[in-house]
Image (cartoon, rainbow, N blue to C red):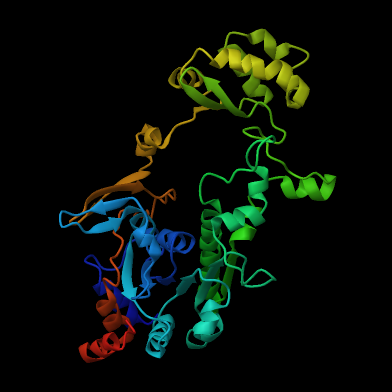
Amino acid sequence: MSPHGIDALGALHPAGLPAGALRGVVVLDITRVVAGPFCSMLLADLGATVIKIENPNEPDYARAFPPTLRAESGEEFSAFFAQYNRNKLGLTIDLSTEEGKDLLRTLASRAHVLVENFRAGTMDKLGVGYAELKKVNPRLVYTAISGYGQTGPYRRKPAYDNSAQATGGLWSMNGYADRPPVRVGTIIGDLSATFYAVIGTLAALRHAEQTGHGQLVDVSQQDSVLSLTENAVVSYTVDGKVAAPLGNEHPFVKPYELYPCKDGYVFFGGYTDKFWRLSCQMFSRPELADDPEIDTMAKRFTPEVYERRIRPLLHEWFADRTKIELEELAGDQVPLSAVKDIGEVVEDPQIAARDMVVDVDYPDFGELRMFGSPIKLDATPTNPRGLAPKVGEHTEMLLRALADLDDTQLAALRARGAI
């Protein structure tokens, strides 16, 4: 971006450009729902100036997702949307109009990164895909997040998170063997694609800074989910084993699962010889550490031995103790964690110490508590407390600053429905 463009963007922020490791990096965010918005949000938390571009007639439909903040006037604002679009500036452009396409080309010529999450080929059909935009900015990093990627026979299929869980193998592995498969209880297809997109974007951005050449960052939800299946691929390619649902068990590590206690459940992972010996001492059964049937990790991994000896023992140890009692007993010695509901997590002292639930004041709507940033940088800390924009909130300011438009030109674009 030219010095003029950076200075102009800085003028839009009360304190100048956002602080952070990505200060001065300008990101055009043409995304909606989660996978794309979360990717650009992470870049914004790291200090990038992110411009969220929405269709004025069909803005991001996550704006209607619950829960909502409510103003005294009756106006509502989606907390779901706010969480994934914080720290962004809002701009509206209708890319179906020629004027809208021209505006995007102008903005792309002055940006460092563009993120989109449409079906493969959609931006190309509009005439503003990577092949076109790199003509106006060879340094542009163009990050495309989609269900199946930009290549292959599935590239044009519509997809959601569940599509990725289904076709990436994860759904077939989750749940219990005697029941139908169960989806992972969060949008792991969207979220995993987000993380890979951020990694790819940062790698491509560094390459562009070093060489002057941008590139296409192509991230598929299906690919991303497949990479989360741990040993399933090599178990199949080496031994011909097809991964099946195991409930709360690990494919081979034992004990390493969920166990009931007096007031709920805990995770216990004391499977190594060191942790097993400490656990036997902790529960006043030190002699078990030397029991010849269960004295090594390999023996405890044996399913028949585990079911006959280890599982009953753990039920005995945990049944009459609460989650808190068990965590206090384990202390810093063995891996034992209470299975907490989200209310308990939000109030967890470790979460508070890590600033992982942040309070943000939305004018007219009140306070919103949402998750913070898991990325902790000591020299250039992240800022997870920014606001999400209203639809097109900064349109005129941004187009004056980055497209050199005056009041007459802006009025004409509005009259033609381009912005």
Residue 138 in view: no
Name the side, left or right, on which 261 lies relative to 7: right
From the top left corner, tell me how far across and down residue 396 is, in percent.
Answer: 25, 79
Outermost residue toward the left in this view? 72
Name the side, left or right, on which 346 lies relative to 363: right
Residue sitting at x 44%, y 59% = 38
Residue sitting at x 54%, y 83% = 125
Q: In which quarter of the image is the N terminus?
A: bottom left
- State the residue in front, 96 or 344: 96
Residue sitting at x 51%, y 51% = 187
Q: Residue 223 is drawn in which quadrant?
A: bottom right
From the top left corner, tell me how far across and down residue 393 is, in percent.
Answer: 26, 71
- State the residue in front, 141 or 210: 141
- State the residue in front, 4 or 349: 349
Q: Residue 203 is drawn in which quadrant?
A: bottom right
From the top left corner, tell me how far across and down residue 261 is, in percent.
Answer: 51, 19
Residue sitting at x 35%, y 43% = 355
Q: Residue 98 is drawn in which quadrant?
A: bottom left
Name the side, left or right, on which 419 lies relative to 160: left
From the top left corner, tell me how far across and down residue 3 is, in percent.
Answer: 34, 81
Residue 274 in view: yes
